[in-house]
Image (tube, rainbow, N blue to C red):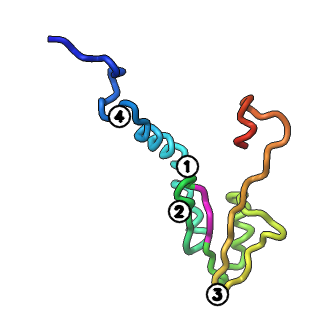
Amino acid sequence: MRWDLIGSSLGDSPKELGNSLGTRREIAGKKIRGLATRLPEVIGVCGTQVELNQLTKELVNVKVKSKSKKWRESLLRKFRLIAVGPHVPQIMGDDQWLTAGKLPRMVGKPPVPGFSKYV
């Protein structure tokens, strides 16, 4: 009996050869696992709705009930994703929306050479 191991790496199924989509999904799942575990915490602070960008899995919008007095401060303390200043959410009826912008750019040398364009 002969085993055909050409084009296989002993652990990969032939279905995934030449297609790294499964691997990418696994990597993406690992990257967002921390965010997925923090979402109940965000919802607990906000009391309502949280939206994620489907491509990057980043926090995009948080819908907050205006009845909560210190919702902005507690969100800033917990996540530090929402800019303070001119980007304060605008009041829209009974609800308010926060939009998380891009995080500040890194100053100085990148921790990994060659990756500064992605920071």
**Which of the 4 image quadrants contains residue 76?**
bottom right
CB atoms of marks 1 and 4 within 8 Å: no
Q: Main secondary structure of the magenta part?
A: strand
- Tell me which numbered mark, 3 or 4, is placed earlier along the sequence: 4
Q: Which mark is residue 16?
A: 4
Q: Which mark is residue 34?
A: 1
Q: Position of residue 108 (x, y in %)?
A: 85, 37
> Can you say which quadrant of the picture contains the C terminus?
top right
Q: Earlier in the sequence, mark 3 or mark 1?
A: 1
Say which residue label 3 marks: 94
Q: Secondary structure at mark 4?
A: helix
Q: Is residue 90 left or right of residue 6?
A: right
**How busy is the neighbourhood of tag 4: few (under 14 within 10 Å), some, or many (20 plus)?**
few
Could you tell me how far apart the alpha carbons at marks 1 and 4 are, in whole angstroms?
27 Å
Query: Which residue type carries mark 3?
Result: Asp
Name which of mark 1 and mark 4 comes first in the sequence: 4
Residue sitting nearer the eye, 50 or 45: 50
Spatial CA distance of label 3 from label 4 is 50 Å
